[in-house]
């Protein structure tokens, strides 16, 4: 009778390989128990791998949209801050003009003119505000300033009103300069006259940042400031009484320009609310998709722990057998 047996070297090799395999599987289970996720997703999901890929694509798109929306909100906040600053300048200058009457002194009128010029400069600077490397109020022409400097504009306005001695005539000339098609369009405004910056805020949904420096609300405020500022100065031919009249006209204009600025603030506020609402919706969608993704790739903790316990027992048995085999000798075998 012929007995077949595995040689000692081969037996050691087989047991070593089996031990290594058990250790590898044990480490895999430990990782899965720690992370709560399957290590080999391809084997775990099978045909459902495409479902995981689709979820990952949607999650990536949602993250990009949410990140972009945060940037859009910051831009809108900057626009809203700029509008508030211009309205503050308008309000403060309006108070200065309300103090002007037919009995105001030359000093009072000149002080009001300086205040108006300062407000004019501040408004120009605000409308040239940049968000990062983009101009906020220049439409799609985001590289450069939206308006020329206040010095350039005032030089043109001085030329426009040169020789006029009546407050009503000066007021009309300034209004015409700031009207559509006037000097404001050809000299002052250097932004995009037609388009607006558009931002994608959701799949198939864009938001237009539709506030430009050439909006009528800004023209009205700047014109009112200009009237008060140009009531005095080297380029003005007005008498003290006419200068006071022009500043009173400016006061009325500043009060009426509130409507246009308020409408702009409301429009920007509505855009902010829209972006916030969509961002909140994207956040909810992301949570739902994350839960679905986790369900796909998660490892059942109870099943994993049970398999880990069985594997530990197998490994301990393997180590015990290996230890016993290593102690075998010819003497013990002959016994």
Image: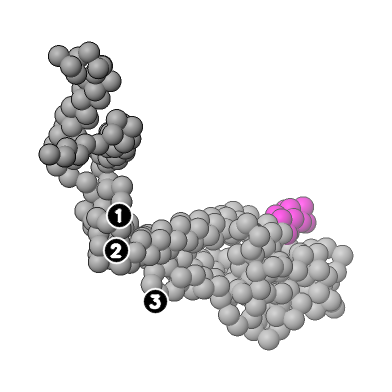
The answer to which quarter of the image holds residue 183 is bottom right
Helix, strand or loop status at disc 3: loop
Residue 41 marker: 1
Q: Can the viewer see residue 319?
A: no
Residue 303 point in image, percent of width and height: 14, 42
* Residue 293 to residue 193: above or below: above
Q: Is residue 288 above or below residue 183?
A: above
| Residue under the image location 25 percent in, 36 percent down | 6
Q: Cα distance, mark 1 to mark 3?
A: 32 Å
* Mark closest to the chain's N terminus, 3 or 2: 2
Mark-to-mark CA distance, 3 and 2: 27 Å
Q: Quadrant of the C terminus?
A: top left
- In the rendered image, is residue 128 in sight? yes
Identify the disc placed on residue 49.
2
Task: Decide which of 296, 262 is in the foreground and name it.
Answer: 296
Of circles 1 and 3, the one toward us is: 1
Task: Tell me whether the residue at label 2 lies in contact with that at label 1, contact meaning CB atoms closer than 8 angstroms.
Answer: yes
Q: Which mark is residue 204?
A: 3
* Residue 27 in picture, x, y percent from top left: 30, 36
Q: Residue drawn at (76%, 77%), measured in percent from left and top? A: 187
* Closer-to-camera residue (55/205): 55
Q: Is residue 111 magenta?
A: yes
Q: What kind of element bears circle 1?
A: helix
Which x, y percent locates residue 298?
23, 49
Q: Is residue 300 above or below residue 141?
A: above
Label 2: how many residues lie within 10 Å, few (<14), some (14-19) or many (20+)? some
What is the span of residues highlighted in magenta in the rendered image?
A: 104-118
């Amino acid at each position: 009778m012929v007995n077949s047996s595995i040689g000692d070297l081969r037996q050691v090799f087989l047991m070593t390989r089996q031990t290594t395999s058990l250790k590898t599987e044990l480490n895999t289970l430990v990782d899965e128990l720690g992370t709560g996720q399957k290590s080999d997703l391809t084997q775990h999901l099978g045909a459902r791998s495409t479902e995981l890929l689709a979820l990952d694509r949607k999650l990536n798109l949602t993250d990009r949209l949410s990140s972009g929306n945060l940037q859009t909100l910051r831009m809108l906040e900057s626009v809203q801050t700029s509008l508030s600053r211009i309205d503050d300048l308008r309000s403060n200058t309006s108070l200065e003009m309300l103090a002007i009457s037919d009995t105001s002194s030359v000093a009072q009128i000149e002080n009001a003119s300086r205040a108006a010029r300062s407000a004019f400069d501040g408004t120009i600077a605000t409308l040239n505000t940049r968000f990062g490397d983009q101009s906020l109020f220049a439409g799609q022409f985001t590289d450069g300033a939206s308006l020329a400097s206040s010095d350039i504009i005032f030089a043109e306005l001085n030329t426009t009103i040169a020789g006029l001695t009546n407050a009503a005539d000066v007021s009309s000339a300034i209004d015409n300069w700031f009207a559509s098609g006037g000097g404001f369009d050809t000299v002052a405004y250097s932004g995009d006259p037609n388009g607006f910056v558009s931002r994608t805020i959701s799949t198939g949904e864009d938001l237009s940042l539709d506030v430009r420096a050439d909006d009528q609300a800004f023209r009205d405020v700047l014109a009112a400031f200009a009237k008060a500022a140009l009531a005095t100065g080297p380029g003005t031919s007005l008498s003290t009484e006419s200068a006071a009249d022009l500043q009173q006209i400016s006061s009325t204009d500043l009060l009426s320009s509130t409507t246009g600025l308020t409408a702009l603030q409301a429009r920007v506020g509505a855009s902010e609310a829209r972006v916030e609402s969509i961002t909140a919706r994207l956040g909810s969608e992301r949570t739902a998709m994350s839960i679905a993704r986790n369900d796909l790739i998660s490892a059942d903790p109870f099943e994993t722990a049970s398999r880990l316990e069985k594997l530990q027992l197998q490994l301990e048995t393997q180590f015990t057998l290996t230890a016993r085999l290593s102690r075998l000798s010819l003497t013990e075998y002959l016994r």
